[in-house]
Structure formats: C-alpha cells, structure tokens
Amino acid sequence: MSIPSLDHSAGESAVVSRLRAAGCVFAEDEARMIMSAAGDAAELEAMVERRVVGLPLEHVVGYAEFCGLRIEVDAEVFVPRRRTEALVRQAAELAPERAVVVDLCCGSGALGVALAAALGEAELYAADVDPAAVRCARRNVAPAGGEVFEGDLFAALPAGLKGRVDVLLSNVPYVPTVEIELLPAEARDHEARVALDGGADGLEVLRRVVAEAAEWLAPGGVLLFETSERQADEAVAAVTRAGLLARVATDDDLDATVIIASLPDTA
C-alpha cells in the first residue's frame, strides 16, 4: 500500500494500516509521530518501511520522549525506557542545589539531561564506552551545559571529579548474557549489545561501578541505578560488599526497581 500524501488524511490512514499490519499496537500514535518527523512523502515512505521491518520507533523518528523532553536517539543507541523516569524522579528528590551530576553508561544522555532539567541548575558530566552513544549524547548533553566523555566507566571521567559527585546515575546493562536472545527484537537486533549485556548474572558491570563509586561520591552523595525485581537482593548485596549503604525504591506504575546507594556516615 503506497502513501498518497504526507499531509492528507488518506495518507495517515495508509500509514496506520501498514503499521497495524506489521503488529504495531499503537499504530495511530506511531503514525502521527512518523508523519510529524518526515520532511516529505519520500522520507515518510522510507520511515514507515523502516518501522514495518522492525526498527524501534525512536530510531525511525530520531528521538525519544523522556521525562517530558525530546531526546535525540541515533541508530543502535540504547532507547531510554519510560520506567527509568522513576530513577530520575528519585535522583531529583535527593540532589542538593547546584548538584554535580554524572551520568555513567549514559547512552543518549537522557538521564543526566532529564535530571539537570528537573533541578534547573546542575554541573553535568556523562560518559559511555560506545563511540556511537557518545556522539549521540553530546548532541543532547551540550545544550544542557554538560560534557560527555568516551571511555570505560570511571576511567572516562576527569580525575578532578573524584570526591565531588553529588548524584551518580549509572544505568548499567543488567540483562544476563544468556537472556539477550529472549529480549524483544527491537532491543536485541537494533540496540548496541554493550548497552544490554550485564554478563553471566546481569550484575558484572554493576559490581565494577560500586567497587569505585565511593572514591567519586561527595559527602552525602548518592549512586542510583536500575535493576530488575528479581536481581534486587543480589544488587543490594553487591552495594553492601563495596562498603556502601543501600535501599530499594520501587514504582509500581512504571514497573521500576531503583537501588539508591550512599556513603556511610562516619561522623
């Protein structure tokens, strides 16, 4: 079925029909997003085709809606999940004024940008090991006044941040390696594996983060990361073994489990 026109109602109907036939549950909403993003009929046709063959909607239109913001998302870059908005909300409640914020394993940079927007004023840094993610994140983070670095976890960050970080967001990959193939095709086939694969039990990257987090946190600083409900107990144990205090926050509406870790009070 061809698309008659970019702005004609018949064109929208044709897009909806093609998306619905491809199994898109929210075909009407997706059609409106795609038609809004397309510059002309030829681009619209190409975008619909990419969606029909299984590319994530966010990769097709080039952005994701996250915490009320439009975050640019390039092909193969991890798409920020709506459930992760719970992590940002928790961070916003805990952050001091003019917080130093680090978004580690930043992907598109969505978490740091959203937190900075919620706080109104923050010193923002982000880092990722994936060059494609870093390129994408810079376009999102720079307008927020932040900087993005490329490298492996804390090794990417300026040494001057040690002991200064008020809020450390580290949405590490937490899918066990053997479960990658069980993920929806949109994630499995179109997002960078490094953004998904958490190792044998899904917590290998997390353990590396918590092992160094204390060196980077400021007094009163917090580390926040997302995990699955079934991994929460072991994630808390990993935090505790690293000498940090941990508590679990859940959001039933978003089906989110967030671990909040902090330095123990030595006073």
Image (tube, helix red, strand yellow):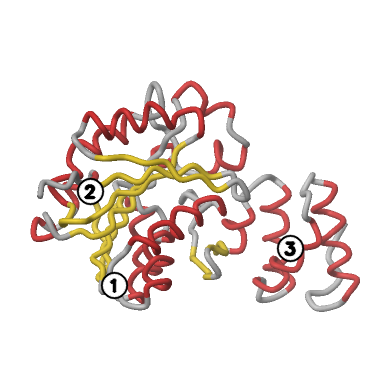
In the rendered structure, the answer to whether residue 244 lies left or right of residue 181 reads left
Q: Earlier in the sequence, mark 1 or mark 2?
A: 1
How far apart are labels 3 and 2 at the CA level?
Answer: 38 Å
The disc labelled 2 sits on which kind of residue? Gly
CA separation, marks 1 and 2?
A: 22 Å
In-image side of 84 versus 182 (left or right): left
Q: Is 40 above or below relative to 245?
A: below
In this picture, residue 144 sits left or right of residue 192: left
Badge 1 marks a residue whose secondary structure is strand
How would you rate the neighbour count of disc 2 (Cα within 10 Å): few for under 14, some for 14-19, many for 20 or more? some
Residue appearing at x 16%, y 51% in the figure:
216
Residue 34 lies in quadrant? bottom right
Instruction: Name the foreground residue: 93 vs 145.
Output: 93
- Residue type at mark 1: give it: Ala
Crowding at dot 1, Cα within 10 Å, few <14 / some 14-19 / many 20+, comes out as many
Q: Are marks 1 and 2 in contact (CB under 8 Å)?
A: no
